[in-house]
Image (cartoon, grey):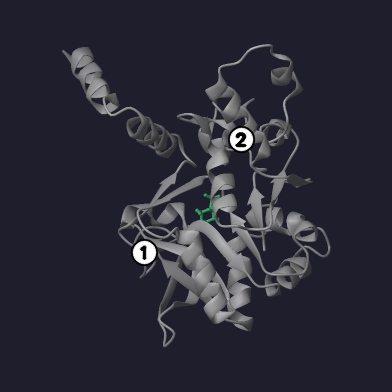
Amino acid sequence: MKALIPAAGLATRCLPASKAVPKELFPVFDRPAIQYVVEEIVDAGLDGAVFVTAAGKESVLDHFDFSPRLAMKKSMAPALQKQVDYTSSLIDVISVRQKEAKGLGHAVFSGLAAVGDEPFAVMLPDMIFLSKGKAVFSKMFDAFQQSGASVIALMEVPEEEVSKYGIVEGSIDDSGLFSISSLIEKPLPGATPSRYAIMGRYIFTPTLHSILRHDYRDGSGEMELTDAMTELIKREKLYGLIMDKDDFVFDTGDLKGYALASAFMAAQHHPDFMTQLQKLLEDIRR
Ligand code: G1P
């Protein structure tokens, strides 16, 4: 199974920081945001990743490539050299271009030829996952193998956050999985009876190929991935894997979530980071 990484967006929520630098390359402490999802794909043992990019995003691909300029550098600290080599050897880069900004459904559609006519994963690089136990994607993969149906990651979010996400309704069925009965993209708070949000990890059967191909056949229109899933549940089952208290996710899609992820990773690496930050804040307020 291959993973598709949509990385073509303009990141308007991160302007002006994302004006010339792709949001996917913003550093989250010691590595660019997109490296976390690539490491997740490698850890899951998937057969590679397809990057869906757009004009101006070439540097996202360069990050995972061999760097001739760094190779020419005479001396580099061994630890740094190791990191550079590790990054270039992480994954073979396959990329396709989304030629028009027509929504997430269209970005996935743009990558279909590269994943082949088989089940595939979609991993949104905005979301950085951490788990104390088994990784969320591994649990999704088990559910996919057990059911043979498409599976997406879900997390219960506070009411005031439902409008940031695709929201689903459904119930636990006999198999013990959450069977999805309806989906709505970014509803208004109070307008949905459920608070189960789609968290950017999806495994799809090839049925989604035919839905997206049908919708973009004439090259017109814009479709959210959530709309394609609404069509999918008319044809076959779609399950949700509800994340539990041992699973954590950072939504770096907006600047606050991004800053939180960076601070968390910094605190993981430097135990005194939070104390120093706290002291700085107190000193400046005095
Ligand atoms: C996308 C999806 C949405 C999902 C969210 C987080 O929205 O359209 O359904 O809940 O990612 O995974 P975006 O954040 O790209 O606007």
What is the three-letter code of the residue carrying label 2?
Answer: Tyr
Q: CA distance from mark 2 to mark 1?
A: 39 Å
Q: Label 2 CB, ligand 1: below 8 Å? A: no
From where the camera sits, is residue 196 visible?
A: yes
Image label count: 2
Which image quarter is the N terminus in?
A: bottom right
Label 1 sits on residue = 195
Of tags 2 and 1, the one toward the viewer is 2
Residue at the image position 56 percent from the left and 62 percent from the top:
202
Name the quadrant containing residue 65: top right
Residue density around tag 2, few if under 14, some if 14–19, many if 20 or more, within 10 Å = few
Position of residue 242 measured from the top left corner of the image (x, y, whole percent):
40, 67
When the figure is inspected, residue 73 is found, relative to residue 89, above or below; the finding is: above
Q: Label 1 CB, ligand 1: below 8 Å? A: no
When the figure is inspected, residue 116 is found, relative to residue 125, above or below; the finding is: below
Residue density around tag 1, few if under 14, some if 14–19, many if 20 or more, within 10 Å = many
Label 2 sits on residue = 86
Residue closest to the far right: 218
Residue closest to the far front: 78
When the figure is inspected, residue 176 is found, relative to residue 161, above or below; the finding is: below
Circle 1: element type: loop
Relative depth, front residue between 141 and 191: 141
Disc sitting over residue 102 in the figure? none
Position of residue 102 measured from the top left corner of the image (x, y, whole percent):
70, 51
Residue at the image position 36 percent from the left and 31 percent from the top:
269
Position of residue 147 measured from the top left corner of the image (x, y, whole percent):
54, 80
Q: Does 230 sit left or right of 188 as displayed?
A: right
From where the camera sits, is residue 18 visible?
A: no
Name the quadrant containing residue 261: top left
What is the three-letter code of the residue carrying label 1?
Answer: Arg
Residue closest to the far bottom: 174
